[in-house]
């Protein structure tokens, strides 16, 4: 028979582990936001924004994810005006389109 104190201890340990995982996740997002402000060029910013967008839709925060998509599209447009054949920007634009498709799929908004 399982001791009730052992079960209580297990729940306490699981609670603290889940709390630490949540704080680790938020610190990762905060460090990405700090990197976004210190990025040297727009391509780096676009890559970071796409990662932040993915993290937002994984948390089902679709409005924040759509804001990141808009920011990425603006930077991509700026970079493509400079050079329309910039392969790296086109790859990141494909990731941005993929993010927006995933957002609308999980939202259940197929009309867009």
Image: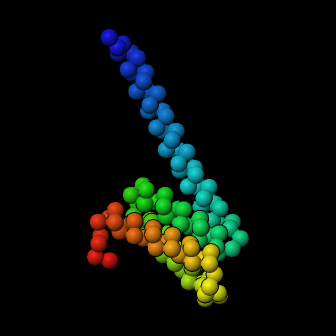
Q: Position of residue 51 (x, y in %)?
A: 54, 62
Image quadrant containing the C terminus: bottom left
Q: Quadrant of residue 14?
A: top left
Q: Nearer the viewer, residue 90 or 69?
A: 90
On screen, residue 17 versus residue 89, left or right, reads left
Residue at 56% across / 83% down in the picture?
Answer: 77
Q: Position of residue 78 (x, y in %)?
A: 60, 84
- The residue closer to the viewer here, 47 or 68, is 47
How are the colours assigned in the image? rainbow
Q: Quadrant of residue 75?
A: bottom right
| Name of the residue lying farthest toward the right | 40
Image location (x, y in percent) of residue 55: 49, 58
Looking at the rendering, in which quadrant would you find the N terminus? top left
- Relative to 1, say whether 86 is above or below: below
Q: Residue furthest top?
A: 1
Looking at the image, which residue is at 43% across and 27% down?
12
Quick check: 77 above or below 8? below
Question: Would residue 30 appear left or right of 101 to someone viewing this image?
Answer: right
Depth order, front residue of 5/112: 112
User: Exactly how many numbered labels are in the figure?
Assistant: 0
What residue is rendered at 45% in x and 67% in y?
Answer: 99
| Residue 27 place in picture, x, y as percent | 57, 50
Query: Would you say residue 26 is visible in this rendering?
Result: yes
**Can you see residue 71?**
no
């Amino acid at each position: 028979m399982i001791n009730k104190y052992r079960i209580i201890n297990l729940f306490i340990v699981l609670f603290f582990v889940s709390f630490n995982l949540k704080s680790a996740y938020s610190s990762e997002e905060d460090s990405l936001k700090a990197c976004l402000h210190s990025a040297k060029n727009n391509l780096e910013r676009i890559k970071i924004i796409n990662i932040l967008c993915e993290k937002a839709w994984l948390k089902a925060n679709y409005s924040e994810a759509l804001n990141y998509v808009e920011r990425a599209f603006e930077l991509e447009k700026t970079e493509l005006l400079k050079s329309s054949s910039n392969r790296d920007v086109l790859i990141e634009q494909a990731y941005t389109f993929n993010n927006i498709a995933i957002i609308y799929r999980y939202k259940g908004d197929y009309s867009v």
